[in-house]
Amino acid sequence: MTDIAGRIAKLPLKDRAKLLSDLQRDRPTVPTRGTFSHPSDWPNAKIGLKQSANLDDLGFEEMALQPPGPGQIQVRARAISINFRDLMIAMALYPPTPGVPSVMGSDYAGEVVACGSGVEEFSPGDRVMVLSAGDTAPDGKLLEGTHFCAVPNVWAFQAVHIPPNLNFIEAASIPTAFLTAFYGLESVARVQGGERVLIHTATGGVGLAAIEIAQARGAEIMATAGSEAKRDYLRQRGILQVFDSRSLAFADQISGGVDIILNTLSGEAVARGLGLMRPFGRFLQIAMKDQALGETLPMSAFRLGLSFTTINLSLFLFNPSMLKRIFKELADGLATGIWRPTPITTFPPEKIGAALRLMSQYRHIGKIVIDLEARA
């Protein structure tokens, strides 16, 4: 493990020296070949993305199409969003969750094409959004290597009906970003009006979803972002206290403390954030690097009755009733219009490599979505 710019760097790559240099500049790049097949080349099959450490071998391929097992639904994806997790998996930097495959492409929106026995809440033709962990065998085994699978079988509890006011592109942007923010702020922290909430790297999907949820509750929001353009965007969203996420100066610039921190930073930023917490503060940790390295916390901060919760959506697969309940609450809120989807940048499936490259450059705001209906 190499500690570089707040990331895990485990680099079994052919171009290791170049990637190390890019990471040190905080601008990792993803080389791609750019020759792809379209998912519709195999209309009756699932499409997977081959995993490669440097992504030179990106390309869709035909995969066996299996019927859904009991309690499962089969979904034809119309759009898939990309998360930073996908980039980390592609670059062989992602710390895996035991029992859950590290599969790219966890956020789907599409149509149900078949239902296994015992499924009552869905029917063929239903529009659904899905928090996926890759394709699932009829016997319930999660399948490794089923990256960006176009016709996955998933457990029914992993899906929810798409609200009528969202299209497939918007719905695909929802699962990871909004489930992370909603679970953290609503289920764990129970954010209240008037509380002070600090959201780090707030122009990403999770950060902007958190802004929607915190604003709807009447919380006072403070935020960080990694460029002046992104900080200007946050100010335009009505956030008055905006700081640099690539500096620890926020800890000195914020006065009066905070009640909740949604944290995507690692290293010393964690301790500095804990030092900002008010009594009974709630610290929500999304970044996984410190966990993978076994870092410890300054326990003296917890004399104020603080709570510290790590958020890993992969663990929801071990608690189906929790995921089903939270996903339904989230969809109901989106249907009312109290929360809006984040800004979205779309790519056709032939340009997944370009989409991952954009993710690696930290220039986009909001979500990146692959439109499986589009062609380059």
Image (tube, rainbow, N blue to C red):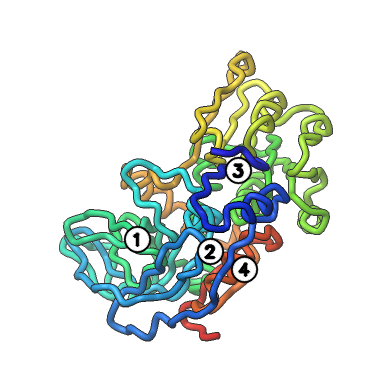
For label 1, count other residues whose C-alpha is less than 10 Å away and answer few (under 14), some (14-19) or many (20+).
some
Q: Earlier in the sequence, mark 3 or mark 2?
A: 3
Mark 4 and mark 3 in contact? Answer it, CB < 8 Å: no
Q: Quadrant of residue 123?
A: bottom left
Q: Secondary structure at mark 4?
A: strand
Q: Earlier in the sequence, mark 1 or mark 3?
A: 3
Q: Secondary structure at mark 3?
A: strand
Q: Which residue is mark 4?
A: 344
Q: Secondary structure at mark 1?
A: loop
Q: Earlier in the sequence, mark 2 or mark 4?
A: 2
Q: Amino acid at mark 4?
A: Ile
105 vs 298, left or right, is: left
Q: Which residue is mark 2?
A: 173
Q: Earlier in the sequence, mark 2 or mark 1?
A: 1
Mark 2 and mark 4 in contact? Answer it, CB < 8 Å: yes
Q: Which residue is mark 1?
A: 145
Q: Where residue 18 appears, x then y in whole percent?
A: 64, 56
- Label 1, label 3: how far apart the Cα atoms are: 24 Å
